[in-house]
Amino acid sequence: MTLNIAKLTGSKTIENDIECLAQVFKGYEPNFSNKLFVISGAAGFLAGYIILLLKYLNQSVLKKPARAILLDSFFPRHMEDWADDKNLKFIRHSLSDPFFLD
């Protein structure tokens, strides 16, 4: 099953971007498979692309999914639809405060 990014974002352009980015990562799958990433500023433009790329790689490329902890003090409403992914953990957190992994 392929991830429908256009449905998540409302943009066919972003879907094409993510598919192109995934092609660039061919051969680097071991660097992503079964790894944990911490993404700060997760509600930002670039972080949004990274999150969509991880979702795409998890569903279409990787044998073992990558996981991500997503930090931001604000999450826009459209990102709430992404929260159903068990490999992504959204945490409302200001980076001016220390963050510790449990």
Image (cartoon, helix red, strand yellow):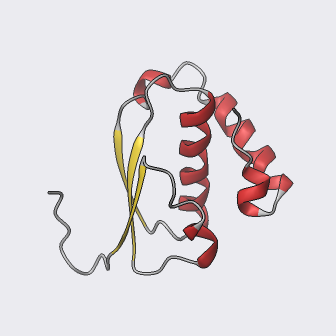
Residue 79 relative to residue 39: left or right: right
Q: In the drawing, does residue 64 fall left or right of residue 76?
A: left
Where is residue 7 shown, x and y percent of the image?
A: 77, 56
Q: Is 59 situated above or below 7?
A: above
Residue 13 sits in which quadrant?
A: bottom right
Q: Say which of 41 and 88 sits in front.
A: 88
Tally of numbered tags:
0
Image quadrant where residue 98 sits: bottom left
Quarter holding the N terminus is top right
Is residue 11 shown left or right of residue 59?
right
Q: Is residue 82 above or below residue 17?
A: below
Quadrant for the C terminus in the image: bottom left
Q: Residue at image x 80%, y 45%?
A: 16
Tell me what residue is drawn at x 73 percent, y 38 percent. Answer: 19
* Residue at left offset 30%, top offset 75%: 95
Of residue 95 and residue 5, the one placed in the foreground of this image is 5
State the image coordinates of residue 88 (x, y, percent, origin top left): 43, 53
As drawn, which residue projects farthest toward the right?
12
Residue 62 left/right relative to 93: right
From the viewer's perspective, is residue 55 above or below residue 34? below
Where does the image place residue 40, in percent across and percent down from the top left? 39, 64
